[in-house]
């Protein structure tokens, strides 16, 4: 069924994307299955690095091609990033010995699963395959259908009502006014920051809920991607709620492995320094993944620094409370008011980062046709 719908989705004028997808699936499957065969008998780290690079190669070409050549690569298609993350994770789990019996058909099923093929959520092979092989009971499936209907209704509300109103009626006049006012920053830009940030959430979260809802109908419990991110108390909490399949992927396959490598090689004596460097590298890589533009990279660095500050404050607070306890004083307040303050600060910090991410500042500062008319 997935193959049929994918043919329709990439058919017609999108036939080039369809052939790019077919080539990509064949390429990634070959890399994964050949490495699996190799890993059963050998474990050379350089062969592992090579296979990770080979799985990343199509994505790297797609990202770099517009800058080097000036036009999009023929290898590009909607969803290439998410499928790449799936196969990279499989290579890493094979190296760890956690994946040993992947078949070509189970791999195809995983990669071309229709609901998540274009924009996620990013599932893991073992979790997906277990769902596929386990037929839910009648009662369990009825419960899954109920959840699916809920996800589809909320997704429709988010994407086709709230996001539609924002992107059609509210954001365009605000954006135009902000560009006309010009300058480094103006009040209309602040308004654009909040409305665009909200639209990004409702649009993407709405789509993700559709993907999860359809997955549930098909008997697959695809993990949710958003969990009330604007109620996060700090930046670490935010990344445990926002685009979770992506943030958890980076946590498991970049951050944790980077921390392990740095500590094993004793690059830094201090564990806090190690985690801080890992935060910065991890989020900067995430920024580059979004695109090779200054605002995407800055967005990644912004969150890397933010997570470093967040961890510093948590450690500082523990030290302060320890000193206050020794002095016979009460610890720093930790109640609903401080919780609300944390939510308020985090929300606004996130909105600033999303303004950077939007690329609007690039237009405002460097490509503003209205500024040239003044």
Image: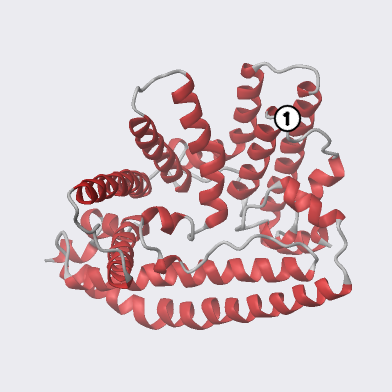
Q: Where 286 sits versus 271, above or below?
A: below
- Whether residue 156 sits left or right of residue 36 in the image: it is left
* Place of residue 242 in the rendered image (x, y in percent of width and height, measured from the top left): 48, 60
* Place of residue 317 in the rendered image (x, y in percent of width and height, measured from the top left): 26, 50
Work out which residue is located at the far left of the displayed protein and give it: 374
- Whether residue 63 sits left or right of residue 327 in the image: it is right
Identify the element where label 1 is drawn: loop
* Place of residue 161 in the rendered image (x, y in percent of width and height, measured from the top left): 51, 83
Query: Which residue is located at x 65 percent, y 33 percent?
Result: 92
Query: Which residue is located at x 81 percent, y 71 percent?
Result: 140
Please tell me which residue lies in front, 329 or 273: 329
Please tell me which residue lies in front, 18 or 196: 196
Q: Residue 104 occupies which quadrant of the picture?
A: top right
Quarter of the figure that contains the C terminus: bottom left
Q: Where 150 sits versus 4, above or below?
A: below
* Local crowd size for mark 1, using a 10 Å CA cut-off: few (<14), some (14–19), many (≥20): few
Please tell me which residue lies in front, 176 or 243: 243
Residue 11 visible to an observer of this rendering: no
* Image coloring type: secondary structure
- Whether residue 101 sits left or right of residue 304 in the image: it is right
Please tell me which residue lies in front, 363 or 244: 244
* Place of residue 292 in the rendered image (x, y in percent of width and height, measured from the top left): 41, 42
- Whether residue 270 sits left or right of residue 63 in the image: it is left
Quarter of the figure that contains the N terminus: bottom right
Q: Which residue is mark 1?
A: 97
Work out which residue is located at the far front of the displayed protein and give it: 328
- Count of number-bearing discs: 1
Residue 270 visible to an observer of this rendering: yes
Query: Which residue is located at x 81 percent, y 25 percent?
Result: 37
């Amino acid at each position: 069924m997935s193959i049929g719908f994918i043919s329709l989705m990439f058919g017609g004028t999108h036939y080039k994307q369809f052939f790019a997808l077919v080539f990509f699936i064949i390429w990634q499957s070959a890399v994964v299955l050949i490495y699996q065969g190799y890993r059963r008998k050998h474990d050379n780290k350089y062969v592992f690095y090579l296979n990770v690079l080979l799985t990343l190669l199509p994505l790297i070409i797609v990202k770099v091609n517009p800058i080097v050549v000036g036009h999009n690569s023929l290898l590009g298609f909607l969803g290439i990033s998410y499928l790449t993350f799936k196969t990279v994770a499989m290579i890493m789990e094979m190296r760890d010995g956690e994946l040993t019996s992947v078949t070509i058909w189970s791999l195809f099923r995983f990669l071309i699963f229709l609901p998540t093929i274009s924009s996620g959520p990013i599932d893991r092979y073992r979790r997906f395959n277990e769902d596929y092989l386990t037929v839910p009971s009648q009662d369990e499936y009825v419960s899954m259908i109920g959840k699916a209907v809920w996800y589809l209704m909320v997704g429709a509300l988010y994407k086709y009502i709230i996001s539609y109103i924002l992107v059609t009626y509210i954001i365009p006049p605000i954006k135009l006014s902000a560009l006309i006012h010009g300058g480094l920053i103006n009040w209309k830009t602040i308004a654009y920051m909040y409305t665009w940030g909200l639209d990004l959430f409702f649009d993407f979260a709405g789509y993700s809920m559709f993907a999860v809802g359809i997955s549930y109908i098909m008997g697959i419990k695809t993990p949710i991607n958003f969990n009330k991110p604007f109620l996060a108390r700090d930046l670490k909490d935010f990344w445990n709620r926002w685009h979770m399949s992506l943030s958890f992927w980076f946590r498991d396959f970049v951050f944790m492995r980077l921390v392990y490598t740095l500590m094993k090689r004793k690059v830094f004596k201090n564990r806090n320094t190690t985690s801080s460097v890992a935060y910065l590298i991890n989020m900067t890589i995430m920024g580059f993944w979004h695109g090779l533009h200054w605002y995407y990279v800055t967005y990644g660095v912004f969150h890397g620094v933010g997570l470093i500050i967040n961890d510093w404050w948590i450690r500082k607070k523990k030290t302060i409370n320890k000193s206050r306890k020794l002095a016979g004083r009460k610890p720093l307040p930790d109640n609903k008011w401080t919780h609300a303050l944390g939510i308020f600060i985090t929300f606004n910090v996130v909105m600033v980062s999303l303004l950077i991410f939007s690329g609007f500042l690039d237009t405002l500062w460097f490509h503003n046709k209205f500024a040239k008319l003044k």
